[in-house]
Amino acid sequence: MADYHISCMPAEAAHYLNLRPGGIYVDGTVGGAGHSRLICTHIQPDGLLIGIDQDLDAIRHARKILAPFHPRVSLHHDSFSHLDRIIHELGLPGVDGILLDLGLSLHQIEGSGRGFSFMRDEPLDMRMDVEAKTTAAHIVNNWHVDDLTRIFRDYGEERRARKIAKVIVQARSQHPLASSKELGDLIYRCTPPAEARKQKIHPATRVFQALRIAVNCELDRLQRTLPRAVACLNPGGRLCVLSFHSLEDRIVKQTFREMARDCHCPPKAPVCTCGGQAQVKLLTRRVVRPSTEEVAANPMARSTRLRAVEKR
Ligand SMILES: C[S@@+](CC[C@H](N)C(=O)[O-])C[C@H]1O[C@@H](n2cnc3c(N)ncnc32)[C@H](O)[C@@H]1O
């Protein structure tokens, strides 16, 4: 794996995580290890970084990049949805901060050979964890047209979901779809030329996003992980999430708001009877976006959104 270490919003992530020497932090999405390395430099000499990634390539790469910080680094090939178990197995009562930098790493897009991009002619795989069962090829070649339509609409916000699903079903009746470029070209060809010209993004972008989310169960895992992550924080500990599209950001925003509310009684209840207490304080009332300087230097950062909470 090449040394991809362009991390999004590093200064903001460091600020909202409140990194300090001796602290214990989790990077739940190690990727190219840019944020992990940043955390390590702030927590020296006796802090601990727990790094998790479901992509074994990322963990192998991080072992090399983070070697100078050994033994203050503990790396795990796992899903961040298991972070509570990992923290428990390390015998830790809690941690001071957790970072989730969602989505794909540059290595996965450009160097993994797993068909994440329609620009490359690669096997239609899209698994972040190559030990997982379902591939994108399995989905496009086997799922019912209604299920394809549903994921393209719900996970890709694709307006032409049914049309594209039908074209895929028609194409696979001739021969199974096997490559990312083949699928990208098929979607491009079934987009009316005037519409394709109007779109700012390639017509296959949303379908590829939808397939990737479905293959890796991304939204379910995120939804399940946020409350577990808060439960693992020490009082005053921080959870900071970087997301890249509105579906992820909506889950983060709504979950954080729910956890920041004291009362969960029905809105029409005259008085509070639940006695609930907020679990977190919102550190970002509005979403935080990258600076114009960062976007100029790294255009891939342009859609990053950061939200953070502090455990009460
Ligand atoms: C945007 S990259 C992280 C980049 C990293 N912050 C850096 O500075 O290089 C996202 C990483 O999260 C990993 N990932 C996504 N979902 C995950 C999950 N549920 N559990 C563990 N890792 C996950 C991906 O495999 C990928 O390596």
Image (cartoon, rainbow, N blue to C red):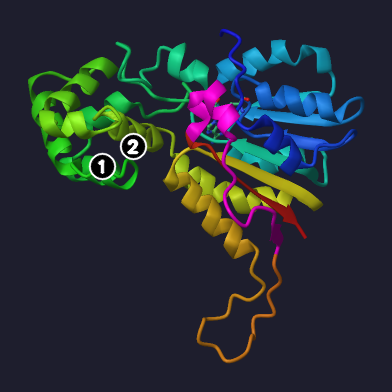
Using the rendered view, name the quadrant where residue 257 is placed: bottom right
Q: Residues within 10 Å of mark 2 (few under 14, many from 20)?
A: many
Q: Residue at x 23, y 40 (%)?
A: 148
Give the number of the disc on residue 158: 1
Provide the residue designation for mark 2: 210
Q: Residue at x 66, y 43 (%)?
A: 240
Q: Quadrant of the N terminus?
A: top right
- Residue 177: x and y in percent read 20, 20
Label 2: element kind = helix
Magenta span of residues: 279-302
Label 1: element kind = loop
Q: For disc 2, does the CB lie below 8 Å from ligand 1?
A: no
What residue occupies the far top of the structure in this picture? 2
Residue 304 painted magenta: no
Residue 290 in view here:
yes
Q: Is residue 89 above or below residue 178?
A: below
- First along the sequence among labels 1 and 2: 1
